[in-house]
Image: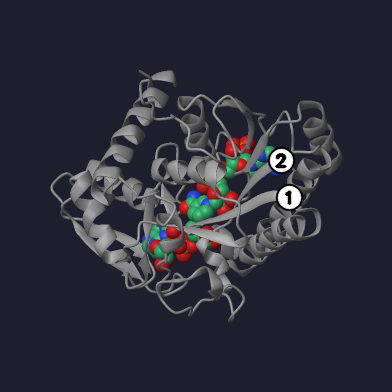
Amino acid sequence: MTASITPAIPSGDLLRPGARVFVAGHRGLVGSAITRRLRADGYEVLTRTRAELDLREAPATAAFLDRERPDAVVLAAAKVGGIMANSTCPVQFLEDNLRIQLSVIAGSHAAGVDRLLFLGSSCIYPKLAPQPIREDSLLTGPLEPTNSAYAIAKIAGIEQVQSYRRQYGASYISAMPTNLYGPGDNFDLATSHVLPALIRRFHEAKLRDPEGGGEVVLWGTGTPRREFLHVDDLAAACELLLRTFDGDGPVNIGCGEDLTISELAATVRDVTGYTGRIAYDAGKPDGTPRKLLDVSRMTSLGWQPKIALRDGIASVYAAWQAEEEREQARN
Ligand SMILES: NC(=O)C1=CN([C@@H]2O[C@H](COP(=O)(O)OP(=O)(O)OC[C@H]3O[C@@H](n4cnc5c(N)ncnc54)[C@H](OP(=O)(O)O)[C@@H]3O)[C@@H](O)[C@H]2O)C=CC1
Ligand SMILES: C[C@H]1O[C@H](OP(=O)(O)OP(=O)(O)OC[C@H]2O[C@@H](n3cnc4c(=O)[nH]c(N)nc43)[C@H](O)[C@@H]2O)[C@@H](O)[C@@H](O)C1=O
C-alpha cells in the first residue's frame, strides 16, 4: 500500500526552498522581514550591506549579480521615508530609487536571474483614486504632491518590470504594499512614517509627564485615512508571490481595512499607556486623504494577513523599548 503524501511544495512552484535569493535591502524594515521569512522556510538568502555594495552603482551591481547568479532577486532596497522626508528631499527620492531600480533590474536580467520581485508602494496610485484602490487605477489621475517624486520613480520601476516581461519574457513581478510597520522600523521623528513616530512621541511624553497633564502634537488634521500592514504578513505574501505568481501588472498587498490618523493615535496612546491630550498641527501636511487598497488579487492566491493592528503595535512597542534599553546599556 502506498501512503498518501501531501507535498510540502505545491506543484508548479516557481521558486522552491533551497533556492538562492538575493534580498537587496536586507537590513531595512521590509528586507529584514523577507530575509527572516525566506530563511525560516529553507531558502538560502544572499545579502550585501550598502557599504559593501551601493546599489545605485550599476557596474558594481551588475558585476556582483553576474558573479553570484542568484536564482531570484527581491528588490527591497530603496530611499524610503515618511511624508516630511518625501516632501523635503524629492531629488533623492526620485534619483536614488531610479538608479537602484535600473542597476538591480537590468543587472539581474544581464546575469540571467530567472525571478525578480520589485517592491513599490501604494503611493503610486492617483491621489483621488476610487477606494478601495484597484491595480488598474494606476496612471488614471494626478498624484499626491508630497510624494510624487518617489511615486514616479516607483511607477518607472513597474514599467521596467513590465518591459522585461514583454520584451524578454522575464518572470519578473511587482508588489505594491500599503503603509507598513514592524520591528526594526525607523523611529527618527524627522524622517519616519507615522506609526513609529506616534510610538516614540507617546512613549517620550509618558516619561516626561507620567501624570498625563501635557499634550502631544501630531502633524496635519488627524482626518486622513491609512491602512497598516505588519511586515511579517507582507513577507508571507512576498514569499507566496515568488513561489506561485507570474502575472502582469502590480499586485496590491494590504490588510483591507483603514482608519483615521486620530483613531490610530488613540490606539497607540493606549498601547503606550500615555494619558495626556492629543493636539494637531494643521500647518503640517496631511498627504493623500485616503489610500485603502483593493487586495482581492493577492487574497485570491490564498494569502490572508494574520496580525491584528493593536497586537502588532504592542509587539513593535515592546521590541523598540528593548532595543532602546540595549542601546542605553551600550552607551
Ligand atoms: N515602509 C513602508 O511603509 C513601505 C515600504 N514599501 C517599500 O518597501 C521597500 C523597502 O522599504 P523599507 O524596508 O520600509 O525601507 P528601509 O529604509 O527600512 O530599508 C531600505 C533598505 O534599502 C537599503 N538601501 C537604500 N539605498 C541603498 C543603496 N544605495 N545601496 C544599497 N542599499 C540601499 C538600506 O540600506 P541601509 O540600511 O544601509 O540604509 C535599507 O536596508 C521599498 O521599496 C518601499 O517602497 C512599500 C510600502 C510601504
Ligand atoms: C508608505 C507611504 O508613506 C508616506 O506617505 P504617508 O502615508 O502620507 O506618510 P506618513 O506615514 O509619514 O504619514 C501619514 C499621515 O500621518 C500624519 N502624521 C501625524 N503625525 C505624524 C508624525 O509625527 N509623523 C509622520 N510621519 N506622520 C504624521 C501625516 O501628516 C499623514 O497624514 C510616503 O512616504 C509615501 O511615499 C509612502 O509610500
Which of the labelled discs sits on residue 170, or is there none? Answer: 1
Picture coordinates of residue 187, whole percent (x, y): 43, 44
Picture coordinates of residue 232, whole percent (x, y): 40, 40
Mark 1 lies within 8 Å of ligand 1 (Cβ measured): no
- Is residue 187 visible from the viewing direction of this image? no
- The residue lying toward the viewer, choosing from 236 and 171, is 171
- Viewed as shown, does residue 98 lie left or right of 191? right
Indicate whether 288 appears above or below 208: below
Colouring used for the render: one colour
Picture coordinates of residue 157, whole percent (x, y): 69, 58
Rendered-image quadrant of the C terminus: top left
Q: Amino acid at mark 2?
A: Asp
Q: Residue furthest right?
A: 59
Q: Residue furthest front?
A: 1
Residue shown at 47% from the left, 46% from the top: 188
Rendered-image quadrant of the N terminus: top left
Q: Amino acid at mark 1?
A: Ala
Find disc 2 in the rendering and name its residue: 114
Q: Secondary structure at mark 1?
A: loop
Q: Are marks 1 and 2 in contact (CB under 8 Å)?
A: yes
Quadrant in the rendering for residue 329: top left
- Is residue 72 visible from the viewing direction of this image? yes
Mark 1 and mark 2: Cα distance apart in space: 7 Å
